[in-house]
Image: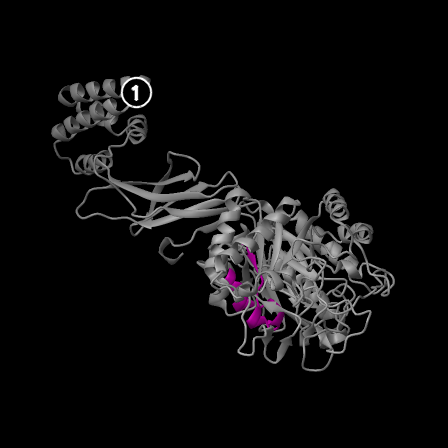
């Protein structure tokens, strides 16, 4: 973690396993422990470390509360362990032990002075008995010296006369459970309607909640809900020709009706929003809001704070561009402004305002286009007061930049998953994200589609690809999401070939979705999300392991709980057109299964039981049915 510059991430209740190379010149033995404490605690707690081999020591502690932790490593010369080791070796060699036993008595007396109460008395008694028997009864003395009781007492009161601490105190950022396991559904509230001429409202969204809950989602994410600018407004399909009934893009935030702390009047009032939030909570669904730090040209900030925006040589304000894309309806903020601190303070107040309205989850739009220092200051400051806040980074950018944002404090992160289609691509991406060191700071959130991303694979692969990508996202990652109802209705029409923009995109117009269509993927999504919820192995990514299948169109991987009480095997056909088959190799020792032992597998999708034997087994999958197995293994 950049030499301790950034904290690692954990969920409340998770372990932190600490490893350190600890050694000393000479033959003296060492003792070591992990020192750890909550940041609010003044004193350290200790977790013992044990030697794993080759001077590598390992110790573990758990984060128990929703606040940052600190930890470091302490090591010391251990006179007792050194003495005991020498005593046993001399005894095996048949050498005289008188002086060694007398030394042991002195060590016991010294430990008694560090102890208190009954332990101090026991140690003084042992010291006396050891000294006396060393002269009169050598076998008895040796028995006392090597007894478990003596060792337990001595290790309880180590001699730290020669101790050294690691030079840094390292950090752990601790999040609530939903940061590690969440199921997101993105929806435009204005499209929560049966008539495109009649925009949906927050009250209409309340009526949609049972539908979302039935599919098993626990986070409902809205694109920006603020007033939409009139100046530079885009028409249907991102057209510069705007009709009187075109609602504009929600990401063109702000108008005379208000800015980032206001609600679009067509959606309802703040009271309506609170009714929706409380109704969602009753279904076990938490609302997430979009944070897009940018402005429409008629946002109040533009008039009130001109220095917050970059002015071009002709005096006009620079609108957003990502060539060849142009966003004439959006002005980016100019953080290098002479008034940059006031800008940063105001933007932090926006998040605090919505926190005050009960929101604790934010999806942040394009964070990689804002300064790193801004995000670090904002997130660290907010989480000091509100440690339960979750920030999802929508940074489709170069990996090192995405990783840096995660280190700075973003709780979860989008990935390149949507564009990874081959077995090799998927395995390379997910392996990197679930192995050290990346997994210590980066929590992936996999999305097969978004309002901006309709991949070529989704356009061409039909219903089988929508099923495949859904199951991949839901089982590869403990956090995943879909943009619906476009996803469950397999919306795959692009505005033109070679683009990932949806035809009739909701970004620029209101859509009245037929959510009850018989070809909807809703039943499959509900089943997959129920499988996720009921199987703890799918609640984490740390145990993910890919397995060999002798067919490049088949991918297989497992997730298991630490105690092997829950073991999940996923096998997927990546070919949307043809049936694929192959032989799967499983490392049975990972599951506590002997090579010649039969074991049960239960297909949680098909509700079917099978018996397998040995590490090599045959699988086949057709894309016309559900193109995947989600197996639960039983020994």
Q: Quadrant of the N terminus?
A: bottom left
> Start and end of the magenta stretch?
411-433
Front-most of residues 185 and 390: 390
Residue 76 lies, in percent from the top left, at 25, 40
Residue 430 lies, in percent from the top left, at 54, 64
The color scheme shown is one colour
Q: Main secondary structure of the magenta part?
A: helix
Mark 1 falls on what kind of element? loop
Give the residue at x 72% y 65%: 467
Front-most of residues 200 and 114: 200
Instruction: Identify residue for label 1.
Output: 116
Asked whether residue 428 is drawn in magenta, I would say: yes
Give the residue at x 66% y 44%: 358
- Image height of 110 relative to 634, above or below: above
The image quarter containing residue 236 is: bottom right
Residue 36 lies, in percent from the top left, at 39, 40
Residue 600 visible, this angle: no
């Amino acid at each position: 973690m950049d030499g301790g510059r950034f904290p690692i991430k954990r969920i409340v209740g998770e372990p932190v396993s600490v490893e350190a190379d600890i050694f000393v010149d000479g033959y003296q033995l060492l003792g070591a422990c992990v020192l750890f404490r909550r940041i609010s605690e003044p004193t350290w707690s200790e977790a013992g470390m044990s030697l794993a081999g080759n001077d590598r020591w390992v110790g573990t502690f758990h984060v128990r509360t929703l606040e940052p932790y600190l930890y470091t490593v302490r090591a010391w010369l251990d006179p007792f362990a050194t003495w005991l080791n020498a005593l046993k070796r001399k005894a095996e060699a048949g050498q005289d032990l008188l002086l060694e036993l007398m030394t042991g008595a002195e060590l016991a007396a010294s430990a008694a002075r560090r102890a208190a109460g009954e332990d101090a008395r026991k140690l003084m008694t042992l010291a006396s008995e050891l000294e006396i028997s060393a002269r009169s009864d050598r076998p008895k003395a040796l028995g006392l010296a090597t007894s478990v009781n003596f060792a337990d007492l001595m290790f309880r009161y180590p001699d730290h006369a020669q101790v050294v601490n690691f030079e840094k105190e390292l950090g752990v950022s601790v999040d609530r459970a939903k940061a590690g396991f969440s199921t997101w559904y993105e929806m435009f509230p204005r499209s929560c309607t049966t008539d495109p001429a009649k925009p949906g409202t927050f009250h209409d969204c309340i009526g949609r909640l049972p539908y979302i809950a039935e599919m098993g989602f626990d986070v409902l994410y809205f694109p920006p809900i603020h007033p939409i600018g009139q100046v530079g407004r885009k028409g249907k399909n991102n057209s510069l020709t705007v009709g009187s009934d075109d609602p504009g893009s929600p990401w063109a935030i702000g108008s005379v009706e208000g800015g980032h702390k206001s609600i679009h009047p067509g959606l309802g009032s703040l009271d309506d929003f609170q009714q929706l939030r409380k109704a969602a909570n009753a279904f076990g669904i938490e609302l997430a809001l979009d944070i897009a730090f940018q402005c429409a040209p008629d946002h109040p900030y533009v008039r009130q704070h001109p220095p917050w925006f970059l002015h071009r040589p002709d005096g006009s304000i620079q609108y957003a561009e990502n060539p060849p894309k142009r966003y004439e309806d959006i002005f980016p903020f100019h953080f290098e402004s002479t008034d940059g601190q006031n800008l940063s303070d105001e933007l932090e107040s926006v998040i605090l305002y919505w926190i005050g309205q009960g929101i604790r989850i934010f999806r942040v739009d394009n964070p990689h286009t804002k300064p790193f220092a801004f995000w670090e200051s904002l997130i660290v400051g907010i989480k000091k007061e509100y440690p339960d806040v979750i920030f999802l980074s929508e940074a489709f950018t170069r990996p090192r930049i995405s990783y840096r944002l995660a280190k700075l404090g973003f709780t979860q992160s989008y990935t390149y998953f949507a564009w990874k289609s081959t077995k090799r691509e998927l395995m390379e991406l997910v392996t990197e994200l679930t192995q050290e060191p990346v997994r210590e700071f980066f929590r992936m959130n996999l999305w097969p589609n978004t309002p901006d991303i309709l991949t070529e694979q989704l356009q061409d692969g039909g219903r089988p690809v929508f099923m495949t990508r859904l199951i991949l996202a839901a089982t590869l990652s403990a956090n995943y999401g879909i943009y619906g109802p476009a996803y469950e209705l397999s919306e795959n029409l692009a505005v033109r070939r070679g683009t990932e923009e949806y035809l009739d995109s909701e970004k620029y117009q209101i859509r009245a979705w037929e959510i009850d269509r018989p070809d909807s993927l809703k039943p499959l999504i509900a089943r997959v999300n129920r499988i996720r919820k009921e199987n703890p192995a799918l609640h984490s990514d740390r145990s993910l392991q890919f397995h060999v299948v002798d067919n490049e169109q088949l991918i297989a991987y497992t997730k298991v709980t630490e105690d092997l009480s829950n073991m999940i095997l996923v096998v997927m056909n990546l070919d949307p057109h043809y049936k694929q088959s192959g032989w799967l190799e499983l490392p049975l020792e990972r599951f506590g299964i002997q090579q010649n032992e039969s074991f049960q597998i239960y297909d949680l999708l098909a509700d079917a039981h099978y018996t397998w034997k040995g590490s090599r087994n045959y699988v086949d999958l057709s894309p016309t049915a559900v193109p995947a197995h989600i197996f639960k293994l039983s020994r």
